[in-house]
Image (spheres, coloured by chain):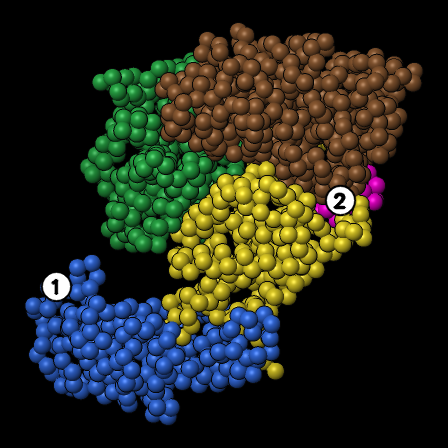
Amino acid sequence: MIEFINFYLIPGITLGSIYALGAVGVSMIFGILRFAHFAHGDLMTVGAYGALSAVWVLGVSPWLAMPFAIGFAVIAALCCDRMFYKPLRDLPTIYTVIASFGVALILRSLIQVLWGTESQVYSSGFQKPLVYFDTIRIASRHVQIISATIVITVALHLFLTYSRAGRCMRAVADDASLARVAGIDTDNIIRWTWVIGAALAAVAGVFVGLDTDVHTNLGWNMLLPMFAAALLGGIGKPLGAITGGLIIGVVEECVSYPFFGESLLSPSYKSAVAFVIMIALLLFRPQGLFRGRLL
Amino acid sequence: MLLFDNIVKNFGGVNAVDQCSFEIPAAGITGLIGPNGAGKTTAFNLIAGHLHPDAGRVVFDGHDVTQLPAWQRQSMGLSRTFQLPHEFARMTVLDNLVVAADNRHGEKILNAIFFPGRGRVRSHEAQLHARRTLEFLEIDALADELAGNLSGGQKKLLELGRALMQRPKLILLDEIGAGVNRTLLSKIADKIIALNASEGHAFCLIEHDLDYVAKLCSKVHVMAQGRLLMSGSIDEVKNDERVIDVYFGGGKYQEST
Amino acid sequence: MSAEGLAFYLIGFLTMGGIYAVLCLALNMQWGFGGLFNAGIAGFYAVGAYTAAILTSAGAASHVGGFDLPIVIGLICAGLLAGITAWGIARVCVRLKADYLAMASIGFAEIIRLVVINEQWLTNGSLGISRIPRPLEMVFSGRQAEIVYVVFVWLLVLLTYVVSQRLSRSPWGLVMRAIRDNDVAADSIGKNVQRFRVEAFVVGSVFMGVAGALSAHYFKFFSPDATEPLLVTFLCWVMLIAGGSGNNRGAIAGALVVWAIWSMTEIITSHLPIEWASRSAYLRMLLIGLFLQVVLQRYRQGLLPERRTTPVQAR
Amino acid sequence: MKLTVLASAVLAIALGSASAYSDEVKVGALMGITGPLANFIPPILNAARLAEKDVNDGGGILGGEKFTLVVVDGQAAAQPSVDAASKLVNLENVAAIMGGLSSGATIASANAVSIPNGVLQVSPTSTSPAMTDMEDNDFLFRIVPSDNYQGQVLAKMVLEEQLSKVAVAYVNNDYGVGIAGTFKAAYESMGGTVTAFEKHEDKKNSYRGELATMASSGAEALVVIAYAGGSGAKIVKQSLENGFFDRFVGTDGLRDDLLIEQIGAEALATTFFSAPTSPDDNPVGEIFHTRFDEEFGEGSDKPFVDQSYDATMLIALAIEKAGTTDRSKVRDALREVANAPGEEVGPGDWKKAVALLADGKDINYEGVSGSHEFDNNGDVAGFIGKFVVDGDSYKQIAIFK
């Protein structure tokens, strides 16, 4: 049992936290701009490399480099929106979806040109995990990642509940036409969506780098689980996306635990878990756990 | 012709249609009126099969069609138009009508691939029929225009033409007059009356303009709050206190809508 | 460089271009006529390729296969199996709206990919299936065989084109377009939307399977890296959008033009100094990404836009 | 239509530039610059460049002509590799092709382009056993032993270390599956026990679950068959952190400076690695690595660097020996310059080799990554070295043949 917690559950929660932060942006963009943003994973990568530059140039720790990560990702997101998504906004969303595929390619190639392709780490060496009660072992970076995710979740909740921009975002995500009648400045809301989505993606990207390493496919590899998380939480429900991310991460890690002597699923099928959850949801409960919008 | 029997339809806790029953006779033009939010369009969707009721049944032409999907009801002779235009925007006006014709052989995929000749005769007939219908509706000049480029009123005519293509027994018209100018509106009315008289199509229409309803309909159902308020001739309805209350009064029905 | 060299480059180019043309025509049946956003092309392509590979390759001890069947039977089975897979997926998925269908189909394609790389008894996993034959290999060899194969590929492009053209001009195609434009209205005029969509999804996927089989025979070897979604799904979408969705000739033209850009940009970048070699490859990807944006913003109709004339001619 | 114009303009420019030089000898380098192997590419390319430089600094090829590598991007996948190889063969008119990194890319490009067009192709890295009995008219060679070989040697090596029970974690691609399969078969037939045998996808972030299961299987060490830059370093790191394993056995994919950087030499003290190498009486590896690091700053210990240099050099030697860029003559010359007997030449000995060939003497190239004696299938038996960590680098301590 203790093995389950140490080696399946805690890594699952860590992975889930990363999915969760990425999924918030996916969910909000889907809810407000109404398209599946296929370049979101690459925004994560942009963030991770932004922090890497700061670590290299300034020699600071990745945590202090976070503002750079966020800055890079937010600027990238706003530029892409202005240049590639805005001109297509009045067309059927399919065009924007395809454009976002192209943007993913553009961002990744830019990273590869600027930073090269070899995988990098923020800091070398390994640390022994912290041990609690002689049984629970948890790496200190996992403690940091999980607690940072909790803080971000609370902050996000406060922002969405109490600030004007946050309330407007929720309103638009719930019903765009109603919001327009109510005189909400849609452009402003869209800007906020990108800022928050990209910032959280950047944080998630840095977390991936902290946990393992930084490479150019880092975000792209996580894109589909993030979509699954956004759907699970309900489109347009940021807190739902966080829950969804945690669930997907934990389930993905835990399916290979030998509950009944045999592992439920061969570990090489782990990635299928997110897809199966996603497809099942699309078919049986497309509004997600938290009654998100249906497009 | 059509029996709307004790229907209940619930949307997220609100009963849009609540134990409502009425009948649409086989001949003549029936009106369905009521204030906004009374459940008229929902009732149409339930009749046409785009929605399915939580309780009650829909009987059309002697068959219980409650469980049938829309496309099957249509092939039994039940056509409709939509409140907001639902044209096939990237197809020509003529094709919009041709596609609505029944072409069972041509629409089989294996025939389409291996025997492209099957269904050709039917297509030819359908085109002639479509052209005649366009002529009757006086929009034949637009036959080769993309339907998406039509004006709102022209789209309404297009939809009417499309509904006529399978020679239906009953046609549901959802606010055929909304957003249409006066001249075109009276033209549409003439067409409806002519069709009812010559071809024997029965009509049921949702309309806000009571004068228009008076011109067309022999019988009127009034809905409010998801229920049938009353039925009768247009004069009976116009003079009924409850109806006046619903429409103008700010009475008890107004608050909840 | 010689004229002969150029000719054989063009033959190689047309072979790959032809395979992409089949894929693109197949996608056009789904998206161009039917408005079905299939983002899992790579999955059906893989099913077709592996079916053909297993049925036609010479014997192998490490996995099922080595039936050594004629290539035509392999092709037919590839199409059939891809079609059956598509039917299963379509039954549950086609009622989903565009973006959701895209996600579900990506999900299925990924599951297919995982099965392919994990079920070693069936597909030989990541080691791939080798010794896949090509048509008329006994008779022709070397450069002659290249010519034979390009003819073979383009015969199948022709077949796909004829089928696609017949479909789009038939009453079936007309209904499909109606569904694409407005499914509720199509429902209201008596068309079984679900049935038509499943049919379009299946028939398109059949040809995606055929395209997969064609590339397996071309490479004479097939391993999971050939099903990379970027190279199959994404590229195919770019081709169709650039060529003009809804138009069969546009689909073929798009496949050739985009494949030409994909292939020929490298002729320039490979002449940059060698220190630039690794960077130029990314610059090339960057250019392709930007090209897509230009097409989407400026040439949305594609090279050959959809024709608006009545598909069934009145006589 | 504008697009067609653009495309033809591109072609025109390309054709113009392709025919601009004529007094050079071109060899194609089919690399997977973008795509799944992208993070291995820069040092591999640098190694090929070093070979190019060695030839040109040593007086050029075929009597002073310039030796030029044309690098193309096959994206480590079949479709673009075939297309890129076709450009090399038909448009660039190369004398031979170095490359195809992943087996899928190599086999597909050989089948569709090199073999039908009669062009020599030498892969530096493809290890798939399927390449051995391909009908290739002797146009396809490789200078790494087939997986079958390294797996067997690794099994021997592990048993010699008195490890009779091991767990195997291998990456699910042609490299990992190939070596792991032969290792398991050989190891078990020699009396060892594989307690757990798990493949994994290399894009995941946590392998703790699988590792925990493997740790509880009673293994004495963990055999990791994966790339350090992919999943390899993560697996070692997570095993050490959680105390699943403290002893590892790796292959050439894991033997990467990146591993020492990420883990630290101390924790790897008991770990050993297998990698293709050259016979011990040919101490060229060390010199080559020093030269490489001087030239490019770093990277000489990355996977497949040695092989990339050797493959390029072998092709250059074969062209020199053939005395022409005629493709089938180049092919015929390859075995003669690579195989014994003959005067031995090594990396950096270009001048000497040219002189020997001019005198009509037979030469035998002994490379950085092995002595490269091709058999009838175009495979090499190869030497597998045993490496351990030494400071911030690796040291070869034994050789298996």
Spatial CA distance of label 1 from label 2 is: 74 Å
Residue A177, percent from left and from top: 29, 54
Q: Mark 1 points at which residue?
A: B256
Q: Mark 2 points at which residue?
A: C9
Above or below D95: residue B74: below
* Colour green, chain: A
- The residue lying toward the viewer, choosing from B97 and A3, is A3
Query: How many numbered callouts?
Result: 2
- Look at 58% across and 13% down and name the residue there: D387
Q: Is mark 1 on a helix, strand or loop?
A: loop
Q: Give the range drawn in magenta.
A: C1-13
Residue kind at label 2, given as amino acid type:
Tyr
In the rendering, what colour is chain C?
Answer: yellow
- Look at 42% across and 67% down and name the residue there: C193
Residue kind at label 1, given as amino acid type:
Ser
Q: Which of marks 1 and 2 is in front?
A: 2
Among all residues in the image, which is located at the extreme bottom? B198
Q: Judge whether residue C9 is colored magenta.
A: yes
Above or below C235: residue A22: above
Q: Can residue A142 be seen in this view?
A: yes
- Look at 57% across and 23% down and name the residue there: D190
Q: Judge whether residue A133 is colored magenta.
A: no
Instruction: Tell me, yes or no, whether dots 1 and 2 are on the same chain.
Output: no
Where residue D57 sits, quadrant-wise, is: top right
Q: Main secondary structure of the magenta part?
A: helix
In the rendering, what colour is chain B?
Answer: blue
- The residue lying toward the viewer, choosing from B188 and C38, is C38
Would residue D311 appear left or right of B177 to someone viewing this image? right
Q: Can residue D101 be seen in this view?
A: no
In the rendering, what colour is chain D?
Answer: brown
